[in-house]
Image (cartoon, rainbow, N blue to C red):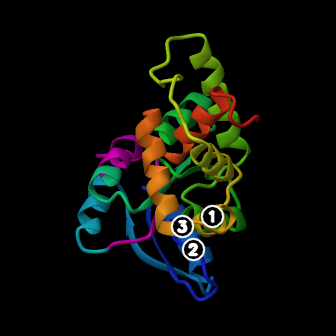
Amino acid sequence: MKNYEPNTVIKVAIADDHALFRTGVKTSLSSRKDIQMVAEAENGMQLLNLLKHVQPDVVLLDITMPIMDGLATLPEIKKLYPGIKVIMLSMHNDHSMISKMMEIGANSYLTKESGSEMIYEAVKAVYDQDFFFNDLTNKALLSGLRTKRTAESSMPMDVQLNDKEVTILRLMCEEKSTKEIADIVDLSPRTVEAIRDKLKTKTGTKSMAGLVMYAVKAGIVVQ
């Protein structure tokens, strides 16, 4: 996680096959002093080619695109460029799709009807805190939890976490930044990041969304 400062300029790329939508997002975000649009693509393959030369901090990724859609592109971005935050975009608000996207590494999910202010807030949040939860993502994740409770879950529930790990996990679920957590538990931000990575390994999760789901299932936090 990075700590957002007022003078920080966040580099953003967008992949969407609708030129009008791309232009609208680019125009609204470019008007912000702390956002720099660095790349645009009309499908996932084009985006992956661009990422060989340009490294944005945040990617806005449409799910439905020709040639290579967002569903196929997301895991490739996470594998090749794990530091890039990805916000999924869609016309739909299907809970199972949102839950799946978050579980395989999406840092947030917005409908295309989201206003420019919402997109801007999401970009800042994922840059600084790794994730941006909204009503859509929360409902989808909790819906996914209910589904998984009725089926066999691959998420290990007998994980032994120490007090510090539990405290840090709770603070992460409260959307505290790395720096805020470090100050509260009196550790360095680097140590907090190391504990966060260890939590992912221990719980068998791959993303912040997965950790939140684990914390809810294990009763560490109540939603």
For disc 3, the marked residue is: 127
For disc 1, the marked residue is: 177
User: In the drawing, does residue 117 fall left or right of residue 213?
Assistant: right
2 or 3: tag closer to the N-terminus: 2
1 or 3: tag closer to the N-terminus: 3
1 or 2: tag closer to the N-terminus: 2
- Indicate whether residue 9 is drawn in magenta: no
Instruction: Please indicate, yes or no, whether residue 11 appears anywhere in the rendered image.
Output: yes
Q: What residue type is labelled 1?
A: Ser
Q: Give the range drawn in magenta.
A: 55-76
Q: Using the numbered discs, state the Cα–Cα distance from disc 2 to disc 3 in whole angstroms.
A: 8 Å
Q: Which amino acid does label 3 sit on?
A: Tyr
Asked which secondary structure carries label 3, the reply is helix
For the point 24% across and 74% down, the residue is: 53
- Indicate whether residue 67 is drawn in magenta: yes
> How many neighbours does mark 3 have within 10 angstroms: few (below 14), some (14-19), or many (20 or more)?
many
